[in-house]
Image (tube, helix red, strand yellow):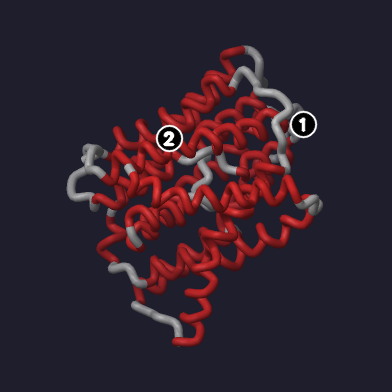
Amino acid sequence: MIEVIGLVAPLFTLILLGYISARVVRIPLEGLAWLNFFVIYIALPPLFFRYLSITPLSEFANTTFLFCATGATFCVFSLSFAIARLSGRANTRESTIQGLAGAYGNIGYLGPPLAIAAFGPEAGVPVALIFCLDNTMHFIMAPLLMSLGDNNREAWIKVIGRILKNIFTHPFIISTIVGLIAAYYQYQPPAPVNKLLHSLADAAAPCALFALGVTAAMRPLKRIPVDLAYLVPIKLLLHPVAVYLAISWIPDVPDHWVYSAVLLASLPTATNVFVIAQNYQAWEQRVSSMIVISTVVSVVTVTGYLYLAKNGYLL
């Protein structure tokens, strides 16, 4: 357990430093925009490209594993959506945000640093591939269900166009595609370019975690919604169990793929869910509380999961 605590403590401390900094130094929220831009568009894409481009093509053949992992996430999304809708307290748009809150983990900011620190550089490959499939699923479900729940329904051609734009303009997905192409052709960039990519990739984790802490501090808790009584356990406990059950039967899957997939599922609700809620003006304040509370509770649950994984209790 001491080893696991030593593994996660520096990462969660970066989040804490961001939180404390935002509470002490009153920099406007707009000041976070450039740091987020750097993380999303400049630092994390080279990290994904770097690990994918040097990976043997045989590693990418685990398609059954990938679709089972994302399929389990879809089931958790559907369950969260159904509970919200059947409770009678939420309409289709609000239920969609609750579905995302229960299934859309912080796999962009927290996933890569935690997985690579815990399971080694080779964990970057399943993290990048699962990220692409999971986000594609979320990018499809959010506008689709929002359109169904909107009284002034958009033309389907616009909805489909937005879905395709969200998928194929996301910097992580673009970098993953480019990394796969580089792996296929066994291309490695020139030494100066490679050195730059390494520097940017090394900056990704500390900047992403610090930004996550600042974001949490900028969205203080006003009240704790009753819906969080089931959404937090769904996200932090049921989601990783569902992914584990979905992939544990698949033969010949490397251990670090299994561990990485379950780790991604165990992460707290992504800050992107708040952005989506703002965009559609649905369940904004409550999802903000969900992000903060699930992030705090995940310090315990993620540490517990890593203890089980590092001690071989999952295989």
- The front one of 238 and 1 is 1
| SS class, disc 2 | helix
- The front one of 79 and 294 is 294
**Dot 1: within a 10 Å radius of its alpha carbon, few (fewer than 14), some, or many (20 or more) residues?**
few
Q: Quadrant of the N terminus?
A: top left
Q: x%, y% of residue 96? A: 60, 30
Q: Total of numbered circles in the picture?
A: 2
Residue sitting farthest toward the left: 252
Q: Which residue is label 1 attached to?
A: 152
Q: Residue at x 52, y 38 (%)?
A: 268
- The front one of 3 and 203 is 3
Q: Which residue is label 2 attached to?
A: 301
Q: Quadrant of the C terminus?
A: top left
- Quadrant of the rendered structure where residue 155 is? top right
Q: x%, y% of residue 296? A: 55, 36
- Quadrant of the rendered structure where residue 228 is? top right
